[in-house]
Image (tube, grey):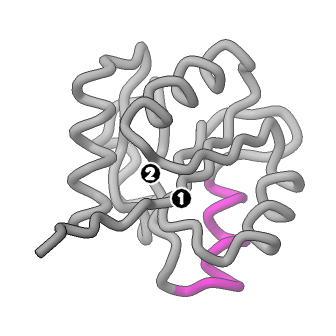
């Protein structure tokens, strides 16, 4: 019998094009379907048009709103799915209490192996 693997859709949100491009390449190499946005409003539009997005990976500090703002808007409309992971330069422990509803954190500068492991763990769990 053939093993059928689900192809997950992931939305990347970051105001730095270099980071978006790098993470797109990494995720596409792992056979994920990737959507990208440089703003919260664009990210919300992408979510509205793509109901099968399983994971949002968002920077916390962005002009025009923070990742926390995005998380609140996502949870107001989609209480459970998609899962949300933050890209951050802050210590994880300082964000834990403020970020209920977050499935994980990826520290900057980004370690690609740790990034992929976090993505896979969050999607599986």
Task: Using the image, tell me which numbered label, if any, was put on residue 9.
Answer: 1
Q: Residue at x 80, y 51 (%)?
A: 40
Indicate the position of residue 74 as horizontal and vertical percent values. 66, 72
Q: Residue at x 55, y 86 (%)?
A: 79
Tag 2 near tag 1, CB within 8 Å: no
Q: Where is the C terminus found, in terms of image quarters?
A: bottom left
SS assignment at label 1: strand
Q: Nearer the viewer, mark 2 or mark 1?
A: 1
Residue 119 vertical position relative to residue 24 in the rendered view, above or below? below
Q: Range of the magenta residues?
A: 68-79
Residue 44 vertical position relative to residue 113 in the rendered view, above or below? below
Indicate the position of residue 57 as horizontal and vertical percent values. 53, 47
Give the main secondary structure of the magenta stretch: helix
Q: Image check: 96 left or right of 76?
A: left
Q: Is residue 55 magenta?
A: no
Task: Residue under label 2, please give it.
Answer: 85
Q: Gap in Å between the C-alphas at discs 2 and 1? A: 14 Å
């Amino acid at each position: 019998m053939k093993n059928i693997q689900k192809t997950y859709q992931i939305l990347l949100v970051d105001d730095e094009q270099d980071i978006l491009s790098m993470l797109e390449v990494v995720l596409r190499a792992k056979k994920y379907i990737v959507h990208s946005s440089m703003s919260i409003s664009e990210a919300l539009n992408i979510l509205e048009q793509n109901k099968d997005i399983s994971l949002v990976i968002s920077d916390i500090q962005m002009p025009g709103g923070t990742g926390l703002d995005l998380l609140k808007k996502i949870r107001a409309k989609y209480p459970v799915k998609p899962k949300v992971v933050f890209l951050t330069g802050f210590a994880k422990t300082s964000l834990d209490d403020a970020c209920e509803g977050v499935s994980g954190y990826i520290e900057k500068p980004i370690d690609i192996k740790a990034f992929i492991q976090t993505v896979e763990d969050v999607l599986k769990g």
